[in-house]
Amino acid sequence: MCRLLETIRYSRDGYDNLFYHTQRMNTSRQQLYGADNVLDLEQMLEKKPLVPDGIVKCRVVLSQTIEKVEYIPYFPRPVRSLQIIYDDTIEYRFKYENREQLQKLFLQRKSSDDIIIVKQGQVTDTSFSNIAFLYKGKWITPAAPLLFGTRRAQLIDEAILEEEEMTVLFIRKCEKARLINSMFRFYESPEIGISQIMGL
């Protein structure tokens, strides 16, 4: 069975959003492997490495137990444009280490920087993040993402995001989009104009 992955932002402020990462990790372990014991990332990652200025990606690879923890310098990939891609069979309910299905779709992006995946008529995610759209002064995120991300969960709990079922027609009514990912905070994410979303 494919291993799971948690990608955690680490900086001089410490580890970010550990409550949501721990919650998702243990839920996934229980559902996939039947693991009933609870792992606590806050305790397991307490030995913090020295970090230079900037942000480091803490990459936790796991199955029933944590198998590997590594720290990788983080260099965000600029995303200024998105291509709509349709795939009714894609599955990424759990954050798997293996991203082969997503990578195949990413290769269909044409001249855009990334993709928006539409599954069975519903807007879901990009190839590496959840997404939100500004509509009538509110940030709306798809109610049926491929992956229920940790940053997404935090922003919904903080009432910054609202969930709605979303079609491509809905995107046309919006003002702009933002990507949602564990490695950047919501208002650090660059805004993408609706005119930069291809295939609408």
Image (cartoon, rainbow, N blue to C red):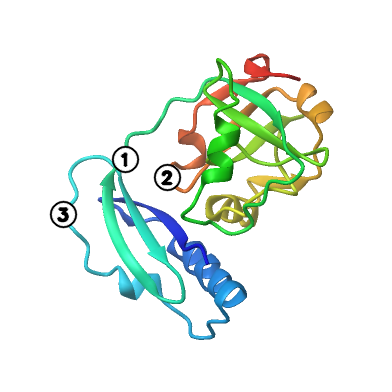
Mark before the other along the chain sequence, 3 or 2: 3
Residue 95: x, y in percent? Answer: 53, 56
Q: Residues within 10 Å of mark 2 (few under 14, many from 20)?
A: many
Q: Residue furthest bottom?
A: 36
Cβ–Cβ under 8 Å for marks 1 and 2: yes
Image coordinates of residue 195 in percent, x first then y, are: 67, 14
- Please, what is the three-letter code of the amino acid marked with disc 2? Met
Q: Quadrant of the C terminus?
A: top right
At label 3, which amino acid type do we have? Leu
Could you tell which of marks 1 and 2 lies nearer the N-terminus?
1
Q: Residue at x 83, y 38 (%)?
A: 121
Name the mark on residue 74: 1
Q: Is residue 57 left or right of residue 80?
A: left
Of the residues shown, which amino acid type is indicated by label 1?
A: Tyr
- Please state if 17 lies on the left or on the right of 11 as rendered: right
Mark 3 and mark 1: Cα distance apart in space: 15 Å
If you read the primary sequence from the N terminus, does the residue marked by circle 3 or circle 1 appear first?
A: 3
Instruction: Give residue 25's position: percent from left, percent from top.
Output: 50, 68
Q: Nearer the viewer, mark 3 or mark 1?
A: 1
Residue 183 shows which numbered tag? 2
Q: CA distance from mark 1 to mark 2?
A: 8 Å
**Circle 2 SS class:** loop
Residue at 46 percent across and 55 percent down: it is: 97
The residue closer to the viewer here, 15 or 68, is 68
Quick one: SS at disc 3?
loop
Residue ID for mark 3: 50
